[in-house]
Image (cartoon, rainbow, N blue to C red):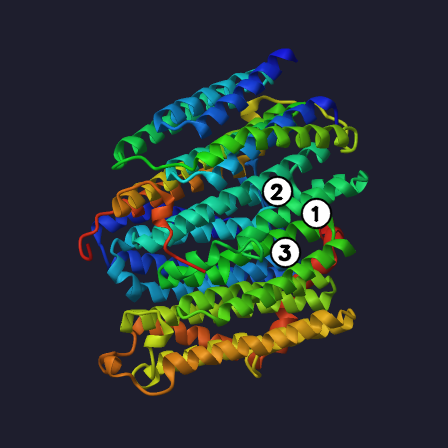
Amino acid sequence: MIFLFIGLPLVTAALLPLIGKISKRVLPDLLANAVFLLLLVLATTAGRQVISQGPTFKQLSWLGEPVGITVAVDGFSLFMLMAISLLTLCIGLFSINYMERYGSKASYYALLLMMVAGMNGLVLVTDLFNIYLFLEVAAIASYALVAYGLEHDELEASFKYLMLSVIASAAILISIAVLFGMTGSLGFAAVADGLRRLDARFVVGFCSALFIMGFGLKAALIPFHAWLPDAHPSAPAPISAILSGLLIKVSGVYALTRIFFSVFGLTPALSQVLMYLGAVSIVIAAFLALGQKDIKRLLAYSSISQVGYVVLGIGIGTPLGIAGGLFHLFNHALAKGLLFLNSGSVQQATGTRNLEEMGGLAKRMPVTAATSLVGSLSIAGVPPLSGFWSKLIIIMALVQAKEWPLAIVAILASVLTLWYYLLIQRKAFFGKLDEKWTAVKEAPFWMTAATVILALLSIGVGLFFSAVIKSWIQPASDVLARGILIALGSWGI
Amino acid sequence: MNSTWFLYMAFAACLLFVGIYCLLTMKNVIKLFIGIEVISKGVSLALLATGFVKKNTLLAQSLVITFIVVEVSLVATALAIIINIYRHTKSLDIRKLTKLKG
Amino acid sequence: MIWQIILLSGLVLFSILAILSKDLIKSAISLALASLFLGILFFQMNAPYAGVFEISVVAGLITVLFMLTIALTKAEGDVRESRLARLVFPLVFVVFILIDVLVMKGLLQKVPALPETSEPGAFGDVLWKQRTFDLIGQLAIILAGVFSMLALFRKRNKDE
């Protein structure tokens, strides 16, 4: 049943071009969104099972014989699956209206479903090489989706993204080859076991460096971020949302965390490296965001900054820090997805992404302005929205670990984040209504529906944060905090 | 690990270096693509050499074959992007392509 | 051993030629020859399946795709490459080789490894039974590639 997470999007994507020939509009929309809804339902039922029974480890069998497909769902994978299904459903809904002008919705939904299949696969596997494989599935789909509009900017951004991504893949594979050479196997449990029997501190350090380079490039950590400020703005708005909200986190942060915690084990040196990398990303990206006039480029730099928070939280290594990091991952996925979708609404209504040209849109697009306000305040960390709690937990964890300078950096950067988000709100939505925009209308139904759902979720998670943390984030951070022992134990070995 | 492994890895590192040098310095988009191909060769060599030294060639071959399939898909996508770039700018020069700043 | 060093050197040599050559078609052919050397090397390493795949797919299919793209993009005038990059390359390469050899020599015996276990079974078993997930992944990759091509080559009817 768990295999449906990968199988269902795959099969639907394969069928979509045929369906697209029959009906150009209604059927692809209906089918794709139905699949997303199903995945969400599946995630909730799997969630209930995992939380009550503990981690699941499924080996598929074909005609009675066990086939070599093993998928494992533990607290961490479940958490990512929920985040992926929630955000993808809203993005699917948004795309119903937004992708009208790009044409050929069947191939768009097919690529989107492939990306979801890739991300789900990445989260569920138990093998180093399979992580790379599903990472590439999602990546290839994303190259095509970034270039979807086939305009000059988009092609340039996509090509740059592709080139840097290839270097990342090479780094990851070389590291996998070295690990394979040392331990003779590729599964998480086997490699962890093998590494504990050898004393290979230097080589593990080398492999960790390669993994940080490879996955850090996928997660757009500074200094590997060069592709993101071009790729995310140029892509169509729902794709920017899924890239910023999910792909950089699943293929970057999740993969890195899974390998470092479940295979290598977090050493103090590694913890320091991750924390400082996170802190550097937070600060530099926040400063770079200040000078931007293009709304989507500003949001893109903000993504780099917030992923820095996530890496900082996870890098602390204590259960509190990991919980804070994961919670922030989820909140940022919702809020940044929301903001990018709104930027799409604004772009569709006004035809521009330049903040200087906008003004006073709140009068004509009240729902968009309100949801945008919710999203901005959530990321900036204003109570009682969800982002406040996650940042608070990260800062508390830093204080608890006696990392005073990093705590101060996190607090100050949060102030900076609040500043530039209020700037967006002021320039785009509030203020005097420019005469150019007197004729704009609110965004169409599905687009507003999607953003309202995300905004309500941000508010809801913020109000009920303790329940959310206890039921859902706690299992995930437990899995990571106990590291290798959990990995070996839960997978029945 | 015995010295054969280091010999193969040394050559794989050379291939990676040549590929990355190409990505850094060449201006023709198709040349950049040849650079990516060279990097892929380096990676396949590294994977198979590791398997060979561990006497585990069957597993390594599966990995290399899967990696080659990934490479083909990547080449197809990239060449599609390149052809679209050509349709837009009527040239293969990456300097003519770069407009996005900052 | 000597045979493998010859093959490896041929591989690296043709890759360098592919990069430095001015004419795109010569580059593509050098790349194909490099793939050929790599394929023969794979045969030498008791990896016949990988060798066949490498030669038929990389030296065959990808070269054809390259030629197709080169034919479709006959540019007006050539792209002028920076001459400095091509002249500086031999120097940088020699420096890199020195660093490479020193690093590898230094790491000799420093990389610990579990003892090798011999592998039972045939290649088919390993690919189909042990690494079945890879096959699902390959299917997904092929689908993703096909859909990208469909999306990137679709007919623009409205805005263009």
Whether labels 1 and 2 belong to a single chain: the reply is yes
Q: Residues within 10 Å of mark 3 (few under 14, many from 20)?
A: many
Question: Cα distance, mark 2 to mark 3?
Answer: 17 Å
When the figure is inspected, residue A140 is found, relative to residue A477, above or below; the finding is: above
Identify the image quadrant of residue A366: bottom left
Closest to the observer: C6 or B102? B102
Q: Are marks 2 and 3 in contact (CB under 8 Å)?
A: no
> Sequence-wise, which precedes: disc 2 or disc 3?
3
* Residue on which the image places disc 3: A74
Q: Are marks 3 and 1 in contact (CB under 8 Å)?
A: no
In front: mark 3 or mark 1? 1
* Residue on which the image places disc 2: A128
Question: Visible in this render: residue A131?
Answer: yes
Query: Is A320 placed left or right of C13 in the picture?
Result: right
Residue lying at 69% horizontally and 75% vertically, measured from the top left: A408
* Residue on which the image places disc 1: A263
Question: Label 3 sits on what residue type?
Answer: Asp
> Sequence-wise, which precedes: disc 1 or disc 2?
2
When the figure is inspected, residue A18 is found, relative to residue B61, above or below; the finding is: below
Whether labels 2 and 3 belong to a single chain: the reply is yes
Quadrant (top left/top right/bottom left/bottom right) for the C terminus of chain A: top right
